[in-house]
Amino acid sequence: MRNIAINLISAFLTGLLVGYLLSGTITISIVLACLASVAILAVVYALIYVLKKRAK
């Protein structure tokens, strides 16, 4: 579970870094895009967790 949290945090920070490198500033749209991508990633992690739990 700790690895999942670390992956989500690093995905958010990497998105912010890429957004900053591309535009030169951090805007609210970049932050929202990073949050949306992390939310999608979290849903995928949860889906995989549920599917693995059902397979047992």
Image (cartoon, rainbow, N blue to C red):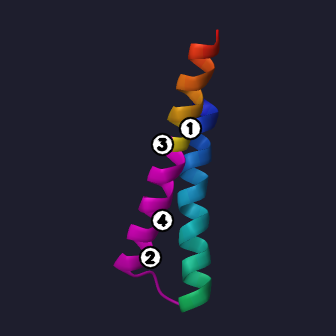
Quarter of the rendering containing residue 28: bottom left
Badge 3 amino acid: Val
Q: Going from the N terminus, do you reach mark 3 or mark 2 first?
A: 2
Badge 1 amino acid: Tyr
| Residue 45, label in figure | 1
Badge 2 amino acid: Ile
Where's the C terminus, which quadrant? top right
In the image, which residues are magenta? 24-43
**For the residues marked 4 and 2, what is the alpha-carbon distance in whole angstroms?**
6 Å
Q: In this rendering, does residue 37 appear at all?
A: yes
Q: Residues within 10 Å of mark 2 (few under 14, many from 20)?
A: some
Relative to 33, 9 lies left or right: right
Residue behind mark 3 = 43
**For the residues marked 1 and 4, what is the alpha-carbon distance in whole angstroms?**
16 Å
Q: Position of residue 8 (x, y in %)?
A: 55, 48
Where 5 falls versus 54 (above or below)?
A: below
Residue behind mark 4 = 34
**For the residues marked 1 and 3, what is the alpha-carbon distance in whole angstroms?**
5 Å
Q: In this rendering, does residue 1 appear at all?
A: no
